[in-house]
Image (cartoon, rainbow, N blue to C red):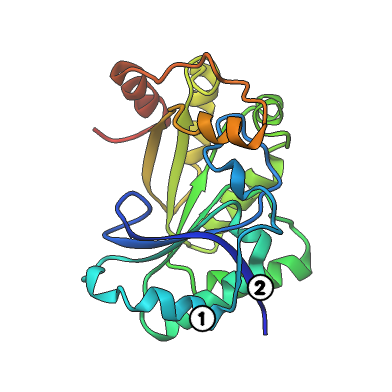
């Protein structure tokens, strides 16, 4: 039996996919995004250990809230670090006709045959992927997250080729992720993907600062401001959002 590690459960999510969602936050993430709002999920050894079946039993009792277009979203941390557990959980969801959404940064993606075989099994039971495209420029992405984004862009292309519906997300931090040229290039890349249904600009906020202080982790964006409505609108236009 494949066991997974979960950080927390949210029974009434309204911003993590279509309709009302039950959101499962998994433990573990390799990236260290400077604006991460869940640093307590970084260690994969944390959280609660659970089986796919036990998790589904917790989730399915809320099915009456989902109506016709809701369902389950698995977020993190980074869900793809627990690929086998995630796949088994989504397979149970599919067997019960539950809509499944994966909220991911794409960081674990590898273009190796053995990895793609496992990923394809997951994608067969995934209705929607919410993909964070944090930056387009590789060096800027490295500075923001500690990792290059080359494989993440490959992942986006792979999902498009597999005809998986995509919602693209971008966290907007003034002076960091709002540079016009990077937004423009991100928008141009998004337009090469065939299955993008929605683009979301998520305004930065510093709500997680107390978590960093409690965990004794240095927070590099203490002086960052939330974007204005005009800055958000400008980013939306450059990314190609329809008004």
Examine the rendered structure and indicate whether residue 136 appears above or below residue 70. above
* Image position, residue 189 (x, y; %): 53, 37
Measured as percent of width and height from the top left, residue 199 is found at 38, 41
The residue wearing badge 2 is: 84
Q: Nearer the viewer, residue 26 or 148?
A: 26
Position of residue 213 in the picture relative to residue 139 (left or right): left
Query: Closer to us: mark 2 or mark 1?
Result: 1
Q: Residue at x 52, y 17 (%)?
A: 179
Q: Which residue is mark 1?
A: 54
Q: Secondary structure at mark 1?
A: helix
Q: Which residue appears farthest toward the front when viewing the image?
A: 214
Q: Residue at x 38, y 84 (%)?
A: 96
Res 71 → quadrant: bottom left
Q: Is residue 191 visible?
A: no
Q: Earlier in the sequence, mark 2 or mark 1?
A: 1
The picture places residue 51, in percent across and down from the top left corner, at 59, 79
Q: Horizontal placement of 234 versus 108: left or right?
A: left
Q: Quadrant of the N terminus?
A: bottom right
SS of the residue under disc 2: helix
Quadrant showing the C terminus: top left
Residues packed near mark 1 inside 10 Å, few (<14), some (14 to 19) or many (20 plus): few
Q: Position of residue 94 (x, y in %)?
A: 43, 80
Q: Based on the displayed image, in which of its 4 quarters is residue 153 positioned?
A: top right
Label 2 crowding class (10 Å Cα cut-off): few <14, some 14-19, many 20+? Answer: some
* Distance from Cα at disc 2 to Cα at disc 1: 15 Å
Residue at x-position 49% and y-position 25%? 183
Residue at 29% x, 52% y is 14
| Residue 84 can be seen in this image | yes
Relative to 75, 78 lies left or right: right
The foreground one among 3 and 111 is 3
């Amino acid at each position: 039996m494949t066991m997974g590690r979960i950080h927390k459960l949210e029974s009434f999510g309204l911003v993590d996919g279509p309709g009302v969602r039950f959101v499962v936050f998994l433990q573990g993430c390799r990236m260290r995004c400077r604006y991460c709002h869940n640093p307590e999920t970084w260690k994969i050894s944390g959280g609660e250990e659970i089986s796919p079946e036990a998790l589904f039993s917790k989730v399915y009792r809320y099915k009456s809230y989902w109506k016709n277009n809701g369902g389950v979203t698995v977020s993190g941390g980074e869900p793809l670090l627990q690929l086998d557990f995630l796949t088994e959980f989504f397979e149970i969801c599919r067997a019960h006709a539950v809509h499944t959404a994966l909220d991911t940064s794409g960081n674990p993606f590898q273009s190796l045959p053995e990895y793609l075989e496992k990923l394809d099994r997951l994608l067969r039971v995934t209705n929607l992927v919410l993909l964070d495209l944090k930056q387009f420029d590789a060096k800027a992405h490295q500075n923001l997250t500690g990792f290059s984004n080359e494989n993440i862009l490959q992942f986006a292309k792979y999902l498009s080729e597999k005809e998986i519906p995509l919602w693209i997300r971008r966290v907007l931090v003034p002076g960091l992720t709002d540079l016009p040229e990077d937004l423009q290039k991100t928008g141009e890349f998004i337009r090469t993907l065939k299955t993008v249904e929605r683009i979301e600009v998520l305004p930065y906020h510093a709500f997680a600062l107390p978590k960093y202080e409690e965990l004794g982790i240095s927070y590099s964006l203490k002086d960052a401001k939330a974007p204005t409505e005009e800055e958000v609108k400008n980013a939306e236009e450059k990314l190609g959002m329809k008004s």
